[in-house]
Image (spheres, grey):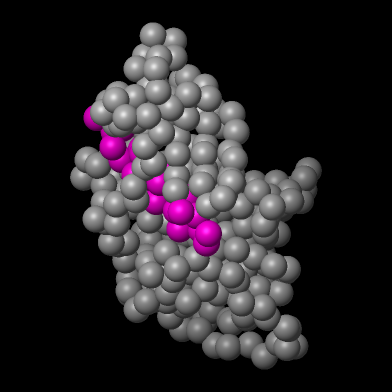
Amino acid sequence: MRTVRILAVALLGFIVTAACTKEQKTSPVKQVPVSATKAYEKYFGPAPTTDKGTCYAFVIYFPSAKEPGKVVPFPFFTFDKDSLKKVAVERLLGGMDVGSYKGEILQPFAHGTRILGLIEENGVITVNFSKEILESNAAVETALLNAITLTLSQFSKVQEVRVQVEGKESGAVAGKDVRKFLGHGGLERQPLTPRESAVLPPSPPRILSVTAMKDKGAKEVEEVNVFFDRPVEIKELKLTGEDDKSFEGEVYHSVFDMAAVLMPKDPSSFKVRMPVKVRWKVIDKVGRSAEGAGEFSLDVQEH
């Protein structure tokens, strides 16, 4: 089951009428608080709740393209406790070049970089990367190491973060000086230090995409998701076509409050890459508000 589908499960119902919302009464569902790191709570406030099992909320720190050496925090959720830290590093490795953040986030890892291993022992996390990481742009090495260290050090019981390349923290790999890349200055086994001063404050909430979901092989969509970059409370939402006519249907908050989900009355109205106009007003869990109006090309995915 794809993450986009998980996020689209309805929790809190409301009907969109013109630009106003009206709450819909639903059967009570037992909600469980998401387990969040202190870093998540610092930048994004109280974690949401879920009825889908034990979930974990944390922060991925992506290098900024606008301010060299700085990182931008983003919320992330997973149900995978056993490989929580590896999931975090894999997500960091995947980069963040979607929606309204295109051009603002650097991809610091050189193409082909892989995670060879992640070991945690006595409060020390050692993450081992393939040699391709040494080809990363020297201008973003500081941000890359800040991103790795901050992302891993937020988890409880983590006291040190170390980075290896092909199992080495010193010496050379494929002709490259590992110590120079890691900024150890010749010192061996020097732990990396998280630098909170490198973290940029999150901007106001933004829309990432407008994505419709349909069953595999189906002709018509099942739901249309307006995805935000963090959990939000939706104050106003209106979806219209090129003719400015509103799309009718029930609208719900998704799991983790990161999307508004329209269950369209006329699913045949939605086609891949069609323009969808969105007027919205939201507020995140620490009081950052945002509103706007824009046109988005409809992405359609199958599940």
Position of 234 with respect to 219 (left or right) is left
Position of 181 with respect to 266 (left or right) is left
Magenta highlight range? 139-159
In this view, the residue in front, 67 or 252, is: 67
Q: Residue at x 67, y 57 (%)?
A: 81
In the displayed structure, 146 sits above or below 8; it is above
The image quadrant of residue 252 is bottom right
* Tally of numbered tags: 0
Q: Residue at x 28, y 37 (%)?
A: 142
Q: Is residue 176 visible?
A: yes
Q: Residue furthest left?
A: 67
Residue 255, magenta (yes or no): no
Position of 141 with respect to 14 (left or right) is left
Q: Residue at x 67, y 90 (%)?
A: 25
In this view, the residue in front, 227 or 108, is: 108
Q: Where is residue 47? Give x, y as percent.
A: 52, 73
In the displayed structure, 189 sits above or below 77; it is above
Q: Where is residue 292? Give x, y as percent.
A: 33, 67
